[in-house]
C-alpha cells in the first residue's frame, strides 16, 4: 500500500472533503510539486469592498473600495500603503478573520465564499500583532497548529521548520523569553506548518531588530525561491523596493498602483542630492548652470534630478570641473509621501475616496 494511499485514508477520516490525492499532494508535498495544478494567481480579488459598520463611538468606515488585485503565483509581492490604508483589512479577509462587504476573493483558486476551508489551507498568515501564547514552547506551538490543520503526526515537520527559521535551539524554550525578531520568525514557522503555497506577512518588520530582520528576510526569500508565493504588507518603501518583485500601492482603501518594482520606481524618476562645500558660494558656477539646483545658506548645493536623464556621477564631475571641494554628501530617499503625491496627482489616480 503506498504511503499516499495510507495518508489518503487518514485524511479522509479526519476531513472527508480532503480525500482527493491531488489536494493532499498540494498540501503536504513541496510547493513546487503542485505547480502542474496550480492557478496563475495565488490571490485574486475582484471588486472587493469592506465597510466597517458604525459603532456607538464611530461612524461607518470604508476600509476597502473596489479593490482588484492579482498576485501572480510565485511572486514576491508587496502591498504598500500608509497606516490606515486598509492593508490589514485585506489580509484579514484572506485569513477569514474579517468578513468582506462585497466582491470576490480567491486564494489559490478557491473562492472564499464557497471554499473557505480550502482557501485557508492554501495560505499561511503571519499577523501584524505578535500574539503568542506564553505557556507553550515553540515545539509545542507548532505541534498544536499542525493538529489544528489535521496534519498527521508522521507528516509533521515542526523541528525541520524551526531549524529553517533559525530557532532549532529554542525549540523547548519558553516563548516569553524570545525576542521580538524570534517571535516573528516563530509566527512564520507557525504559518508554514501546513505547508501552504502562499505565505502572507502583515507588517513583518514591526518590532524586529536589524540583524533578526535580515534573518527573517533570508528565510522568506528562501521559501520564495522554493516556489512559495509571498505577500507582505509594509509602510516602508525601501522594504518593498529591496525585497519584492511587484508592488501594489493602497491608499485610503483604494489600489492606486500595481506594477513591477523597477517600473514603479522608474515612474517616480526624481532624486535629490545635497553637497556641502568646504567654503561659501555666492553664485552658481557656469559649469553647473545646466542643472536644477539651489544654493542653501551659501554652503550647500541641492540638486534635483531625474535619474533616467542625469547620473549622480555627472553631477559630481561638474562640481569638480567648477573647482569646488565637497565636504559632505547627503541624499534623500524617496518617501512614500512622494509616491502618493505623484500617483494621486495623475489622472485616474482614484485616491479621492
Ligand atoms: P492598515 O493595516 O493599512 O494600517 P487597517 O486595515 O488596519 O489599515 O485599517 C484600515 C481602516 O479601517 C483604518 O481607518 C482603521 O481605523 C479602520 N478599521 C480597521 N479595523 C476596524 C474595525 N474593526 N472597526 C472599525 N474600523 C476599523
Ligand atoms: Mg495593518
Image (spheres, rainbow, N blue to C red):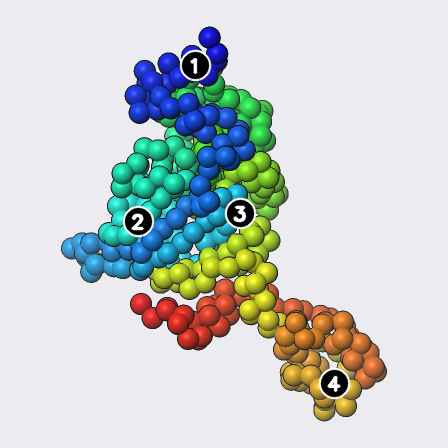
Which numbered circle lies on residue 313? none
Instruction: Say which residue appears at 50% left-offset and 26% top-offset.
Output: 29
- Nearer to us of marks 1 and 3 is 1
Compare marks 1 and 2 and give the one earlier in the sequence. 1
The kind of secondary structure element at disc 4 is: helix
Compare marks 3 and 2 and give the one earlier in the sequence. 3
- Nearer to us of marks 3 and 4 is 3
- Nearer to us of marks 1 and 2 is 1
Instruction: Say which residue appears at 64% left-offset and 76% top-offset.
Output: 305
Q: Residue furthest top?
A: 1
Q: Residue 167 location, x and y as percent?
A: 56, 29
Q: Residue 20 location, x and y as percent?
A: 38, 24
Which numbered circle lies on residue 288? 4
Q: CA distance from mark 2 to mark 4?
A: 55 Å
| Residue labelled 2 has its Cβ within 8 Å of some atom of ligand 1 | no
Query: Does residue 38 lie above or below 247 as drawn?
Result: above
Which numbered circle lies on residue 76? 3
Quadrant that contains the C terminus: bottom left
Q: Residues within 10 Å of mark 3 (few under 14, many from 20)?
A: many
Q: CA distance from mark 3 to mark 2?
A: 22 Å
Instruction: Say which residue appears at 46% left-offset and 70% top-offset.
Output: 343
Query: Does residue 5 lie above or below 29 as drawn?
Result: above
Which numbered circle lies on residue 5? 1
The number of numbered badges drawn on the structure is: 4
Q: Are marks 3 and 2 in contact (CB under 8 Å)?
A: no
Residue 244 in sight = yes
Q: Which residue is under mark 2?
A: 104
Q: Residue 327 location, x and y as percent?
A: 76, 72
Compare marks 1 and 3 and give the one earlier in the sequence. 1
Amino acid at each position: 500500500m503506498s504511503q499516499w494511499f495510507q495518508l489518503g485514508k487518514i485524511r479522509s477520516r479526519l476531513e472527508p472533503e480532503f480525500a482527493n490525492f491531488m489536494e493532499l499532494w498540494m498540501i503536504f508535498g513541496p510547493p513546487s510539486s503542485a505547480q502542474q495544478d496550480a492557478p496563475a494567481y495565488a490571490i485574486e480579488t475582484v471588486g472587493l469592498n469592506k465597510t466597517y459598520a458604525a459603532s456607538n463611538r464611530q461612524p461607518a468606515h470604508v476600509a476597502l473600495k473596489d479593490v482588484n488585485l492579482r498576485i501572480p503565483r510565485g511572486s514576491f509581492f508587496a502591498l504598500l500603503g500608509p497606516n490606515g490604508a486598509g492593508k490589514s483589512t485585506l489580509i484579514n479577509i484572506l485569513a477569514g478573520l474579517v468578513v468582506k462587504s462585497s466582491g470576490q476573493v480567491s486564494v489559490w483558486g478557491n473562492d472564499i465564499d464557497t471554499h473557505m476551508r480550502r482557501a485557508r489551507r492554501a495560505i499561511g498568515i503571519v499577523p501584524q500583532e505578535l500574539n503568542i501564547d506564553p505557556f507553550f514552547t515553540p515545539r509545542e506551538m507548532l505541534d498544536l497548529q499542525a493538529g489544528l490543520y489535521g496534519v498527521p503526526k508522521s507528516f509533521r515537520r515542526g523541528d525541520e521548520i524551526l531549524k529553517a527559521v533559525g530557532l532549532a535551539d529554542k525549540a523547548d524554550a519558553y516563548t516569553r523569553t524570545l525576542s521580538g525578531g524570534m517571535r516573528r520568525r516563530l509566527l512564520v514557522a507557525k504559518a508554514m506548518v501546513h505547508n501552504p503555497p502562499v505565505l502572507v506577512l502583515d507588517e513583518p518588520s514591526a518590532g524586529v531588530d536589524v540583524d533578526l530582520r535580515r534573518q527573517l528576510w533570508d528565510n522568506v526569500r528562501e521559501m520564495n525561491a522554493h516556489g512559495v508565493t509571498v505577500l507582505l504588507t509594509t509602510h516602508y518603501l525601501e522594504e518593498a523596493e529591496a525585497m519584492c518583485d511587484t508592488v501594489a500601492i493602497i491608499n485610503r482603501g483604494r489600489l492606486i498602483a500595481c506594477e513591477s518594482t523597477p517600473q514603479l520606481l522608474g515612474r517616480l524618476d526624481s532624486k535629490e542630492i545635497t553637497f556641502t562645500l568646504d567654503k561659501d558660494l555666492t553664485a552658481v558656477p557656469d559649469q553647473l548652470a545646466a542643472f536644477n539646483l539651489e544654493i542653501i545658506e551659501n554652503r550647500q548645493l541641492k540638486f534635483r534630478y531625474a535619474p533616467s536623464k542625469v547620473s549622480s556621477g555627472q553631477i559630481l564631475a561638474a562640481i569638480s570641473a567648477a573647482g569646488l571641494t565637497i565636504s559632505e554628501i547627503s541624499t534623500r530617499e524617496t518617501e512614500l509621501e512622494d509616491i502618493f503625491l505623484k500617483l494621486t496627482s495623475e489622472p485616474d489616480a482614484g485616491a479621492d475616496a
